[in-house]
Image (cartoon, coloured by chain):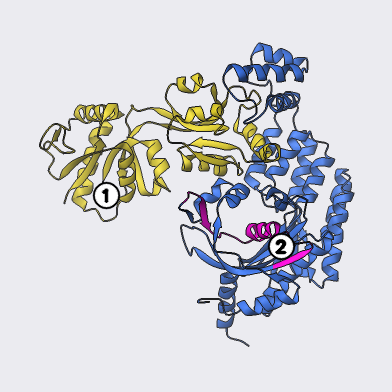
Chain colours: A yellow, B blue
């Protein structure tokens, strides 16, 4: 039996995740060369490490193909339906902080809250012959926040896979739902975050896949790793 | 057709007797009209696919919208009653994803009370024919009455439309009533210049300022909300910022929303409510009472039905009547009036419309339960 732990395969996320594991006394050694995508944890038999993109880690945790992973909460909540039934968030790791937010043009002086936005959405079609358009790559989070949490039903999502913050100025969408860490990109594009428009305060998390077929010894191994990380992230 | 409910032919025969024209609606439909009308939330609940050319398509999630679109495309005259029967497809986490529905859409009958009554009676007659002896419970609601209450209270326009928009969604309505009971205070997030223009009520000045700001920041002034639209709503919002829903109005709204009475007593209950609240609801109550009379004339038995004032559907194309029929705890039929739908879908003139839909799988299940019971 063995368990698979997935870490981000590149960039700041990778460095920060490796640093956390190192500080927790879990030394990760690549198999083969430095740049291989597999590794082991020194002194922990049965724990394999896989380096994947943060997005893949979220998806594979949901599928149960990996047991434990470091990835952004936003990716997990966006990729998985009923995330809390499929994974457990074991620790918040203090890096990769970013908020998923609702932002509207600065010049919408009358819109400060989701309730204001609800008013605007309600008669948008009567005024403009179409529904209010939201540019985002966060379909699920947007739907949950607008429809379930704020009772705003009538709007359309325009998929945006990059430079979302430019969509309102170029007329592709009216508002956006996007991720921001400092807000400076939004500011530069003359967008403002609604006062109650923070959908999710995301950061990198240690996430465990819920499984009912794992052996007791594997569960113990995972408990052990989680415990190590928790000691230093708390 | 395979797996067709056994009683499908009976239903279509009955619908034909009620002068409804059977229509064929393809299973594969363009998805946009459904998403436009019912909202993005529907996306999770329908089966979507794409054509080779990138057009978004879906498996028919319901019949009303395609029946109305077909009516517009074929430029059929009104009044016209349409009958349909077939499968609908919806994603659900638990349970089946495909069900049979049948129903009638009644388009363009200007006699609202009569058309409403016929929709209710036809749904009830069909259920009674399929499930003889079953105990049906009908619940009716009427958005027109709620709109009349809100208007008679003399609430500001912005609040009226918010309240009407939330009607039918109890949680949303509750939180809205709560937030309207508190004054919102100063309009947040505006600078001194804007505040000064607001204070002097200079809407034209605001429009100009917003227009300049849009141009300066590279926003197109005609692609989305216009400067005039933003200025107008801002002025309206500032006017309401110190107002709050007073205790009496809140009490009246809550009393109204709590009304739940046997249909026979509904007219009296509403009359009593309007007298005690001191509101003139005559126009809406006349429509309501005309419907009750039309129901009696159509031979619908009022004794098993109730009026629930808070019952509605929170989508903007529904207007007026809504109803639901259930037996043994399962909803077997749902219907209502959607006077705004056809114009939203592109009809040139307003077409008053009412319809209902039957859940055939639930009806079959109710029939099976019933026939399993030993007869006495």
Is B81 included in the stretch rendered in magenta? yes
**Chain under callout 1:** A
Name the foreground residue: B309 vs A62.
Answer: A62
Whole-percent x, y for residue B364 in the image: 57, 75
Residue B321 in the image: x percent, y percent?
75, 57
Picture quadrant of residue B147? top right
Residue B310 counted in the magenta span: no
Tag 1 and tag 2, C-beta contact below 8 Å: no
User: Which residue is identified by label 2?
Assistant: B355
Q: Residue at x 82, y 67 (%)?
A: B295
Dot 1 falls on a residue whose secondary structure is loop
As helix, strand or loop, the secondary structure at mark 2 comes to: strand
For the C terminus of chain A, the image quarter is top left
- Over which residues does the magenta segment extend? B53-82
Q: Residue at x 89, y 47 (%)?
A: B275
The chain letter under disc 2 is B
């Amino acid at each position: 039996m063995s368990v698979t732990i997935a870490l981000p395969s590149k960039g700041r996320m990778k460095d920060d995740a490796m640093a956390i594991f190192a500080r927790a006394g879990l030394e990760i050694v690549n198999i083969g060369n430095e740049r291989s995508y597999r590794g082991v944890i020194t002194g922990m038999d049965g724990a394999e490490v896989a380096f994947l993109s943060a997005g893949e880690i979220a998806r594979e945790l949901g599928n149960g193909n990996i047991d434990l992973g470091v990835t952004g909460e936003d990716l997990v909540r966006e990729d998985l339906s009923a995330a809390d039934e499929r994974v457990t968030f074991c620790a918040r790791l203090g890096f990769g902080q970013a908020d998923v937010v609702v932002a509207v043009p600065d010049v919408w002086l009358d819109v400060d809250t989701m309730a204001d936005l609800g008013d605007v959405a309600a008669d948008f079609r009567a005024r403009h012959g179409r529904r209010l358009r939201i540019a985002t790559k966060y379909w699920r989070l947007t739907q949950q926040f607008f429809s379930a949490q704020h009772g705003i039903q009538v709007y359309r999502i325009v998929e945006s896979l990059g430079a979302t913050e430019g969509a309102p100025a170029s007329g592709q969408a009216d508002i956006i739902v996007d991720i921001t860490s400092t807000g400076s990109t939004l500011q530069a594009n003359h967008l403002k975050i609604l006062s109650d428009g923070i959908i999710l305060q995301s950061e990198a998390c240690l996430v465990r896949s819920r499984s009912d077929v794992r052996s007791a010894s594997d569960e113990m191994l995972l408990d052990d790793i989680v415990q190590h990380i928790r000691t230093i992230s708390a | 057709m395979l797996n067709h409910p056994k009683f499908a032919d009976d239903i279509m025969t009955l619908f034909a007797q009620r002068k409804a024209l059977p229509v064929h609606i393809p299973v594969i439909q363009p998805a946009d009209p459904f998403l436009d009308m019912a909202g993005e939330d529907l996306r999770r609940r329908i089966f979507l696919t794409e054509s080779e050319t990138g057009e978004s398509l879906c498996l028919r999630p319901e019949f009303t919208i395609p029946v109305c679109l077909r009516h517009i495309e074929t430029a059929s005259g009104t009044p016209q009653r349409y009958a349909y029967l077939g499968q609908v497809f919806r994603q659900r986490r638990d349970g089946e994803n495909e069900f049979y529905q049948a129903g009638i859409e009644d388009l363009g009958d200007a006699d609202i009370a009569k058309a409403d009554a016929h929709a209710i009676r036809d749904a009830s007659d069909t259920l009674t024919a399929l499930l003889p002896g079953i105990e049906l419970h009908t619940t009716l609601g009427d958005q027109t009455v709620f709109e009349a209450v809100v208007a008679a209270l003399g609430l500001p326009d912005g609040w009226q439309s918010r309240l009407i928009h939330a009607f039918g969604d109890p949680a949303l309505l509750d939180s809205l009533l709560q937030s309207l009971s508190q004054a919102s205070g100063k309009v947040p997030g505006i600078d001194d210049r804007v505040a000064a223009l607001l204070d002097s009520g200079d809407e034209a000045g605001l429009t100009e300022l917003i227009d300049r700001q849009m141009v300066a920041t590279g926003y197109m002034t005609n692609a989305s909300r216009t400067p005039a639209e933003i200025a107008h709503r801002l002025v309206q919002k500032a006017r309401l910022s110190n107002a709050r829903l007073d205790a009496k109005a809140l009490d009246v709204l809550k009393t109204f929303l709590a009304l739940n009475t046997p249909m026979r007593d509904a007219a009296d209950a509403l009359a009593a409510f309007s007298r005690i609240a001191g509101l003139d609801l005559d126009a809406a109550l006349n429509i309501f009472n005309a419907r009750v009379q039309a129901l009696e004339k159509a031979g619908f038995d009022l004794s098993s039905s109730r009026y629930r004032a808070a019952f509605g559907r929170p989508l903007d194309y529904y207007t007026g009547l809504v109803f639901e029929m259930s037996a043994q705890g399962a909803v077997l039929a749902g219907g209502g009036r959607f006077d705004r739908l056809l114009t939203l879908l592109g009809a040139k003139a307003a077409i008053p419309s009412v319809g209902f839909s039957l859940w055939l799988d639930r009806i079959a299940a109710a029939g099976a339960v019933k026939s399993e019971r030993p007869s006495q």
